[in-house]
Amino acid sequence: MTLFHSYYRLARESIRLSRWRSLLTMLGIIIGVVSVITIISIGEGVKQEVSRQIQDFGPDLLIVRPGQTVNRDAAGNVIGINLLNTFGPVGTLTDNDVKTITGTEGVQKLAPLAIVNGIAQHDGKALDSGVVIATTSSFEELLSHDTQFGEFLTNRDEGRFFAVIGQGVAEQLFEENVPIGKSIEFRGERFVVKGVFSEFKATPFSGGVDFNNSIFIPYITGKVLSDGATQVIQILVKPEDLTSVDAVQSSLKQNLLLAHGGQANFTVLKQDENLAITNNILTILTALVAAVATVSLVVGGTSIMNIMLVSVTERTQEIGIRKAVGATNQQILSQFLVEAVVLSVVGGVLGVIVSLLLNFGLRITTDLRPAISLSVIAIALILSVLVGVIFGVVPALKAARKHPIDALRFE
């Protein structure tokens, strides 16, 4: 312990004598630790938010999606995810599926979400990044999302030209928050704005569509405008009671399979399955981005190695004097290795501090709620120590192998 303390004291003194160079040396480690911790914490925060949203919808909500987004075993349990079929609609659901689900025993309510192609405008100004979605009056209740201004569509609005819009549409087309009573031109018809939704957070039921930039119109109206060629991206289904969820899910699979001629090009998910899929996707994406972020740790390690090599050259006479008075190769190696580790650890600690400040800033300035865990901080610090050891070996070996006489002669 005493020997390590002496090495640490020498390393601290060396860092103190070249503060700016040491700080620049640690910069790569700092950036790497900040990147890894921030990316993972944001990913975990999003997972927690999605989990909370799914729980808010209730455990009895079923979601019918186009395409086979999951793989199941013989017992029907989800064992894998088809990522290629998970992002965005793939066009295998139709209005006939809506009718099939409506006639399924045990279904209390349903709300299809169908894309109606066309450009929405107001006074010649087009909605650039947005979609028109045809749905039923049950959508608001099943999604558990309130209409902030006005009211949502009712059964009496079917076949009529009313619309409920997201906040993004209100700002983009009308440049105001409450355009109730104003009109939107779409496919040759004028839709009167009946309500404005409160802001949507990222929802697992959006099918890749931003609801904040969406216009919601009555389902029958959407079918009439598109001559029945609507693209259904989601169907939300609520069973009659909580105890019948599994039975209704099974019935939906059987009836839809029959309606699709035996082609299982759809997915019926329960809440826990939907949560598992969403979490798995977010975990994969977070891991990929975090892996890229760790490259900066490698760059930081390379920086430590290069600066330490320069330091060994500059301190050649010091090495010669220490060897002349009896220092062994092992002691010289340990001295420079400890110095490299101290640089990387200090960089890691500074990176953790910056990460905490950055995540606090994200919380107060954005809607993101990063979730930093002690395990992630510990992993980041362990990685910084490993970087110091791995990239400090070469300079330490070079210092240890110097011949004392040649080192004393060095100028």
Image (tube, rainbow, N blue to C red):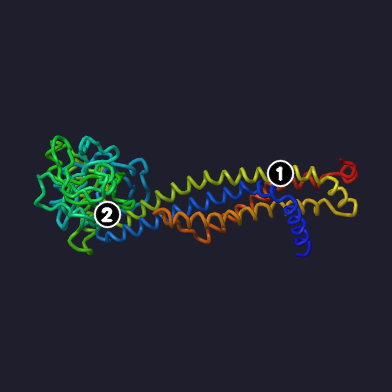
Q: CA distance from mark 1 to mark 2?
A: 55 Å
Residue under pointer 2: 198
Q: Which amino acid lies under the numbered mark 1 shown in the image of this protein?
A: Ile
Is 90 situated left or right of 219 in this image? right
**How many labels were placed on the picture?**
2
| Residue pictured at 75% horizontal, 42% vertical | 310
Tag in front: 1 or 2? 2
| Residue pictured at 80% horizontal, 54% vertical | 331
Badge 1 marks a residue whose secondary structure is helix
Which of pointers 1 and 2 lies earlier in the amino acid sequence?
Answer: 2
Residue under pointer 1: 307
- Quadrant in which residue 62 is drawn: bottom left
Is 123 situated left or right of 386 in this image? left
| Residue pictured at 24% horizontal, 44% vertical | 174
Is 281 situated left or right of 139 in this image? right
Q: Label 1: few (<14), some or many (≥20) within 10 Å? A: some
Pick the front one: 366 or 263: 366
Quarter containing the N terminus: bottom right
Q: Which amino acid lies under the numbered mark 2 shown in the image of this protein?
A: Ser
